[in-house]
Image (cartoon, rainbow, N blue to C red):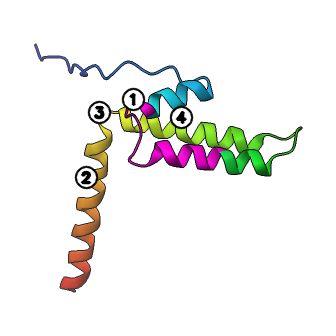
Amino acid sequence: MSAQYEETPGPAALPLKTIGDIRAALRSGHGFPGDRESFEADLQRALEASSETDLNAVAAVIVDYRGRIRLYQDPHFDIAVQEGIDLAARLKQEEQDR
């Protein structure tokens, strides 16, 4: 009988339903370097560009940073990034060898 694959549990998902949740997550160190400051600047620009009836730009900023925080929490993210870097280096080396 073969052993079943067991996925290691990742961190519990943060509640990211409000701007306050996103700010709290960024203050706690979740997200990429510089995201805390960038979020505030991007949010301010989106608010200034939005009308009272069209807040799509604000929603896009919220969705973007919520995704960035979730990516940063993913335990497999660093592995995937490293695989991409390794692939790019290998392709570049193959091109140089031609």
Label 2 residue SS: helix
Residue identified by numbered label 1: 28
Residue 6, how many percent across, how many down?
22, 19
Q: CA distance from mark 2 to mark 1?
A: 25 Å
Q: Are the two marked residues, 2 and 4, in contact with CB atoms closer than 8 angstroms?
A: no
Query: What kind of residue is marked 3?
Result: Pro
Q: Position of residue 52 (x, y in %)?
A: 88, 39
Q: Is residue 96 above or below residue 5?
A: below
The residue pinned by badge 2 equals 82
At 24% across and 21% down in the image, what residue appears? 8
Q: Image point 62% across, 37% down: which residue?
A: 62
Q: Residue 59 occupies which quadrant of the picture?
A: top right
- Name the image quarter holding residue 65: top right
Q: Which residue is mark 3?
A: 75
Q: Secondary structure at mark 3?
A: loop
Indicate the secondary structure of the residue bearing disc 1: loop
> Disc 1 residue type?
Ser
Cα distance between the residues tagged 1 and 4: 14 Å
Q: Nearer the viewer, mark 3 or mark 1?
A: 1
- Which stretch is magenta? 27-43
